[in-house]
Image (cartoon, rainbow, N blue to C red):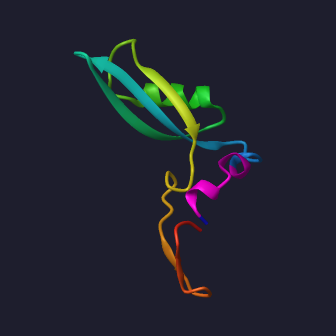
């Protein structure tokens, strides 16, 4: 299965606690700094709040965005399919 074929919304649909990838960003001396966090939470807003709370950055101008975690974010790797003798990207 290819990453583009994976239905992220369908995977997380029935679960109460979802895995989120949160991108925190801030501007320092005209340069943007970013950090990515993997967070378990019920909503995107709670995931952003959790990441901000655990971040070491100080200040009020920390911006966050969240998306549901996909296979690569959860650590999926390539493997050899023994039946078809082909390399598959994700299981």
Stretch of the chain drawn in magenta: 2-11
Question: Whole-percent x and y of residue 70?
Answer: 57, 50
Residue most extreme to the right:
14
Image quadrant in which you'd find residue 13:
top right
Magenta region's main secondary structure? Answer: helix
Residue most extreme to the left:
29
Quick check: is 3 in the magenta stretch? yes
In terms of depth relative to the viewer, which is nearer, 52 or 91? Answer: 91
Question: Whole-percent x and y of residue 67?
Answer: 57, 37
Q: Is residue 56 left or right of residue 36?
A: left
Quick check: is 42 in the magenta stretch? no
In terms of depth relative to the viewer, which is nearer, 16 or 33? Answer: 33
Question: Whole-percent x and y of residue 4?
Answer: 59, 54
Image quadrant in which you'd find residue 57:
top left
The vertical placement of 91 against 3, above or below, is below
Image quadrant in which you'd find residue 6:
bottom right
Q: Is residue 83 left or right of residue 73?
A: right
Residue most extreme to the top:
60
Tell me what residue is drawn at x 58 percent, y 62 percent: 2
């Amino acid at each position: 299965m290819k990453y583009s074929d994976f239905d992220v919304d369908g995977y997380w649909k029935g679960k109460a606690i979802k895995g989120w990838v949160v991108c925190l960003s801030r501007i320092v001396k005209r340069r943007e700094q970013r950090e990515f966090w993997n967070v378990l939470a019920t909503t995107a807003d709670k995931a952003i709040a959790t990441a901000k709370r655990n971040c070491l950055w100080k200040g009020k101008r920390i911006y966050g965005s969240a998306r549901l975690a996909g296979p690569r974010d959860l650590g999926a790797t390539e493997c050899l399919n023994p039946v078809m003798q082909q390399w598959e990207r994700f299981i």
